[in-house]
Image (cartoon, helix red, strand yellow):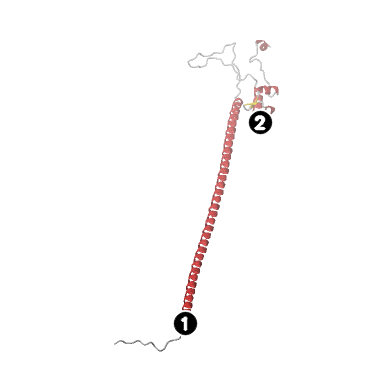
């Protein structure tokens, strides 16, 4: 048996249905708009957060780079100061060594000059001592022996004996008289004492007429410091003997 569908007797009015649908559509649209705005806002917030993070990281990186640059510049300045200080120290050390070397050379030159001067003085002293010794050799006093002819044979060993004959005389020890010889010795002694003490400077020293520590012989003759002497015959002649 077939049932027959019978439509409901209630049927809403078309105006009420349209209004309801419109309101639902409006609510859905508002909800979707709010959701879109929320999502947009969250997206913008996320982007802002990321931007701030990137900006912060950039600032930190810039700050780090700036700090590293400052440290690098400080290190360069420190190394430069150390290099300059090292250079100054090396220059000071070189200057000190140069001055020390100059002082050492001057000291060596001074010592060398002193040694040369000392050697020269020693040589001069020895030369003067030798000259004085030679001069003193002439001043050695010997006892005056009386002139007495000796006769008779004398022992001469394996050689022939010398005999003094009647017409012969023995030569005296000094041909100059004893008084004159003593005067010459006295003069030489006084001259030697003046040389030793250096009391006076004679004209020969001023004129440069000294040779080997003593005056030139011609200068002594011209200034009469030395007077040549002459002595008579050793023995008187026969005529003088008769007189």
Residue at 47% x, 76% y: name it. Answer: 32
Q: Considering the numbered disc 1 on the image, is that residue within a helix, a strand or a loop?
A: helix
Identify the residue under disc 1. 18
- Specify few, some or many for label 1: CA neighbours under 10 Å numbering under 14, 14-19, or 20 or more: few
* Residue 207 to residue 151: above or below: below
Quarter of the image with the C terminus is: top right
Q: Which residue is mark 2?
A: 194
Q: Nearer the viewer, residue 78 or 177?
A: 78
Q: Secondary structure at mark 2?
A: helix
| 43, above or below 233, in the image | below
Quadrant hosting residue 197: top right
Mark 1 vs mark 2, CA separation in Å: 166 Å
User: Looking at the image, which residue sits at the far right?
Assistant: 223
| Spot occupied by residue 217 in the image (x, y as percentages of width and height) | 66, 22
Query: Residue at point 54% right, 52% down?
Result: 80
Q: Is residue 72 visible?
A: yes
When the figure is inspected, residue 89 is found, relative to residue 216, above or below; the finding is below
């Amino acid at each position: 048996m077939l049932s027959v569908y019978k439509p409901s007797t209630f049927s809403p009015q078309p105006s009420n249905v349209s209004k309801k649908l419109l309101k639902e559509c409006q609510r859905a649209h508002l909800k979707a708009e709010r959701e879109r705005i929320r999502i947009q806002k969250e997206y913008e917030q996320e982007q802002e957060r990321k931007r701030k993070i990137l900006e912060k990281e950039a600032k930190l990186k810039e700050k780090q780079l700036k700090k590293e640059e400052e440290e690098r510049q400080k290190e360069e300045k420190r190394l430069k100061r150390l290099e300059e200080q090292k250079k100054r120290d090396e220059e000071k050390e070189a200057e000190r060594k140069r001055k020390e070397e100059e002082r050492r050379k001057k000291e060596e030159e001074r010592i060398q000059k002193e040694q040369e001067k000392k050697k020269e003085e020693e040589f001069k002293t020895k030369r003067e001592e030798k000259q004085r010794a030679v001069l003193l050799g002439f001043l050695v006093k010997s006892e005056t022996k009386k002139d007495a002819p000796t006769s008779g044979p004398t022992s001469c060993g394996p050689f022939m004996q010398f005999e003094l004959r009647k017409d012969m005389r023995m030569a005296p020890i000094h041909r100059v008289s004893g008084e004159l010889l003593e005067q010459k010795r006295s003069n030489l002694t006084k001259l030697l004492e003046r040389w030793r003490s250096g009391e006076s400077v004679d004209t020969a020293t001023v004129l440069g007429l000294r040779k080997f520590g003593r005056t030139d012989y011609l200068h002594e003759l011209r200034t009469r410091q030395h007077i040549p002497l002459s002595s008579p015959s050793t023995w008187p002649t026969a005529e003088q003997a008769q007189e």
